[in-house]
Amino acid sequence: MSEVTLTQIKDSSANPAPLGLLAFGMTTVLLNLHNAGYYELNSMILAMGIFYGGSAQVIAGIMEWKKGNTFATTAFISYGMFWLTLVALIMLPKLGLASATDETAKAAYLAVWGLFTAVMFLGTLYLSRALQFVFLSLTILFFLLAYGDLSAAGPAYKHFTGFEGIVCGLSAIYAGLAQVLNELAGKTVLPLGLPRN
């Protein structure tokens, strides 16, 4: 009987997490600058939602799947689809393809995403402090937005929520850029607060 030889191939593909984090973070900052009252909802936000926040995150998630990373696959593909569905919620009524979503339905949409994010936050307790901050601040953001729609809160509340969203987005940008710079330098340039093994 002949022996079976197994050959293990080393994964030398790039780390897709920075792409996903930057796509999420930059799109989140730009949307929340709108929420904070700096400009109207416009084509820039919709384009970022489709192509960077949406499509680039889905691509990053597929790359993470290839690496066997269940958490990152679930996060990046889910949040990529969040951006695509958010754009669809805005565009479908304008194109005459569906009726507009009322505040109660928007609140339910955002609350479900908040619940999902809260559970994903628990997963970050096994990961870095930087990711814990991203997911905790995102959980808070979703529930703030849901409450705002449910209670028909005024502009001051929406602006406050926008500033919280900017902080969330900036934290994701930091986490993504830190991974890029740390890998390039071969040392910690920007700390992520990695857990001790």
Image (cartoon, grey):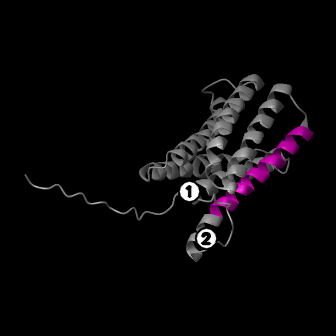
Visible residue check, residue 151: yes
Residue type at the position of mark 2: Asn
Q: Is residue 166 magenta?
A: yes
Most common SS among magenta residues = helix
Look at the image and say whether residue 162 sits in the magenta stretch: yes
Mark 2 — residue? 182
Q: Residues within 10 Å of mark 2 (few under 14, many from 20)?
A: some
Label 2 sits on a secondary structure element that is helix
Q: How far apart are the two marked residues, 2 and 1, measured between alpha carbons? A: 13 Å
- Pointer 2 and pointer 1: residues touching (CB < 8 Å)? no
Residue interval drawn in magenta: 156-177
Q: Camera-side residue: 1 or 168?
A: 1
- The residue under label 1 is which amino acid type? Ala
Return the disc, 2 or 1, that comes first in the chain's sequence.
1
Point out the image quarter for the C terminus: bottom right
Question: Where residue 23 sits: x, y (%)?
Answer: 62, 54
**20 left or right of 157 in image:** left
Q: Quadrant of residue 144?
A: top right
Which mark is nearer the camera, 2 or 1? Answer: 2
Mark 1 lies on a secondary structure that is: helix
Q: Is residue 106 left or right of residue 77?
A: right
Instruction: Rate crowding at label 1 as few (under 14), some (14 to 19) or many (20 or more) other CA atoms within 10 Å.
Output: many
What label sits on residue 17 in the rendered view? 1
Indicate the position of residue 61 as horizontal and vertical percent values: 51, 48
Q: Is residue 180 above or below residue 154?
A: below
> Residue 129 at what x, y percent from top left?
69, 55
State the residue at coordinates (61%, 49%).
126
Q: How many numbered dots are placed on residues in this image?
A: 2
Residue 153, percent from left and from top: 88, 31
**In the image, what residue occupies the spot 83% across and 49% down?**
163
